[in-house]
Image (tube, rainbow, N blue to C red):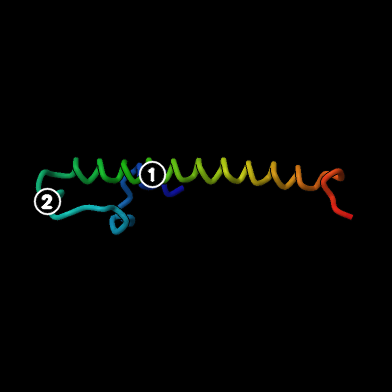
Amino acid sequence: LLGIFFNVHSAVLIEDVPFTEEDFKDGPERIYRLYEQVSYNCFIAAGLYALLGGFSLCQGRLNKRKEYMVR
């Protein structure tokens, strides 16, 4: 969800955008690019979480098989 909110340039999330004073001099285009960069980072992180979660789920199911159980 954060990726979506950063992509629509939510003003509430301005504190999480890494900007400098020089970024405000040329108009909002630089700030919008920074918002989009942070948005892409959020989408990448969400994708990695999904991949690792799926891998963890597969590993959990494999470990529950009876042939791997210790008596």
Mark 2 neighbour class, 10 Å CA radius: few under 14, some 14 to 19, many 20 or more: few
Secondary structure of the residue carrying tag 1 is helix
Badge 2 marks a residue whose secondary structure is helix
The residue positioned 28% from the left and 53% from the top of the image is 17
**Residue 39 placed where, x, y %?**
37, 43
* Quadrant hosting residue 66: top right
Amino acid type indicated by mark 1: Asn
- The location of residue 64, given as percent across then percent down, is 80, 47
Of residue 11 and residue 50, the one placed in the foreground of this image is: 50
- Point out the image quarter for the C terminus: bottom right
The residue lying at 34 percent from left, 46 percent from top is 38
Which numbered disc, 1 or 2, marks the residue that appears first in the sequence?
A: 2
- Disc 1 crowd rating (10 Å Cα; few below 14, some 14-19, many 20+) is some
Residue 32 is labelled as: none
The answer to whether residue 4 is left or right of residue 58 is left
Number of marks drawn: 2
> Image quarter for residue 43?
top left
Q: Which residue is mark 1?
A: 41
In this rendering, position of residue 43 left or right of residue 50 = left
Query: Residue placed farthest to the front in the image?
Result: 70
**Image point (46%, 45%), residue name:** 45
Disc 1 from disc 2: Cα separation = 22 Å
Residue that lies at the very extreme toward the bottom in this rendered image: 15
C-beta proximity under 8 Å, tags 1 and 2: no
Judge from the rendering whether residue 11 lies leftward or rightward of residue 2; answer left or right: left
Q: Residue at x 69, y 41 (%)?
A: 58
The one nearer the camera, 15 or 41, is 41
Comparing 70 with 61, the one in front is 70
Query: What amino acid type should be assigned to the residue bearing mark 2?
Result: Glu
* Residue that badge 2 annotates: 22
Residue 21: give x, y in percent of width and height.
13, 55
